[in-house]
Image (tube, rainbow, N blue to C red):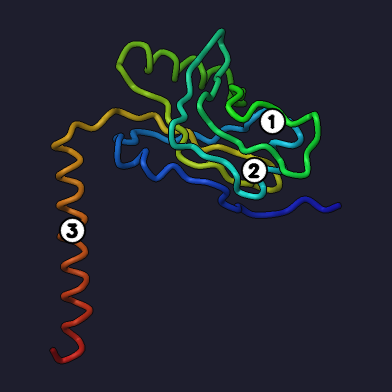
Amino acid sequence: MARQKGIKPVAQNRKARHEYFVEEAFECGIALHGTEVKSMRQGRVNLKESFAAVKDGEMIVSGMHISPYEQGNIFNTDPLRPKKLLMHRAEIRRLAGLVQRQGYTLVPLSVYLKDGRMKMELGLCRGKKLHDKRDDMAQRDAKRDIDRALKNNGRGE
């Protein structure tokens, strides 16, 4: 069977960009069991409360909920089981140092299929304060008003 080409989004963590400043994004693979992959292909994954951490030199994502596969059997795994992320050792060491020393957080931003393999976009993030969130909302509202005015301006109103 030929491998699928291209990128197909599976799930996104929209709340992450609201709660954090994303400094840098990384692509990494996810070590999964068979029924987890099938469930993720159906889009049954939730990234809301998930985070990543370095444990014993390995990158682990916790809190990522993958619903059990409906046609599965006794081999279905725990939905909240910690999953290993596949990254180069040098990247893991660099991220571990940044998280430990400078107070960054590793947050999953999205999960997608790339050429038939499940990948995760992992963000190196810094938390936003309340006033930062308000500034972002004000800028978004102002942009929306400007776009609306420009759209209506060409209609002779």
Above or below, 110 against 79 in this view is below
Q: Which residue is mark 1?
A: 32
Residue at the image point whose x is 53% and y is 36% from the top: 27
* Residue 103 as seen in the image, left or right of residue 136: right
Does label 2 or label 3 sit earlier along the sequence?
2
Cα distance, mark 2 to mark 3?
34 Å
Residue 155's x, y, as percent?
20, 89
Q: 104 or 32, which is in the foreground?
A: 32
Q: Which residue is mark 3?
A: 141
* Contact between labelled residues 2 and 1, with CB atoms less than 8 Å apart: yes
Q: Which residue is mark 2?
A: 40
Q: 33 or 96, which is in the foreground?
A: 33
Please, what secondary structure does the residue beneath circle 2 have?
A: helix
Residue at the image point whose x is 45% and y is 39% from the top: 109
Please, what secondary structure does the residue beneath circle 3 have?
A: helix
* Residue 106 as seen in the image, left or right of residue 2: left
Cα distance, mark 1 to mark 3?
40 Å
Residue 102's x, y, as percent?
30, 16
Above or below, 5 against 80 in this view is below
Residue at the image point whose x is 58% and y is 45% from the top: 112
Q: Give the amino acid at mark 3.
A: Asp
Q: Quadrant of residue 71?
A: top right
Residue 115's x, y, as percent?
68, 48
Please, what secondary structure does the residue beneath circle 1 have?
A: loop
In the picture, the quarter occupied by the C terminus is bottom left
**How many numbered marks are there?**
3
Q: Quadrant of residue 84?
A: top right
- Packing grade of label 1 (10 A; few <14, some 14-19, many >=20) is some
Cα distance, mark 1 to mark 2?
10 Å
Q: 145 or 80, which is in the foreground?
A: 80
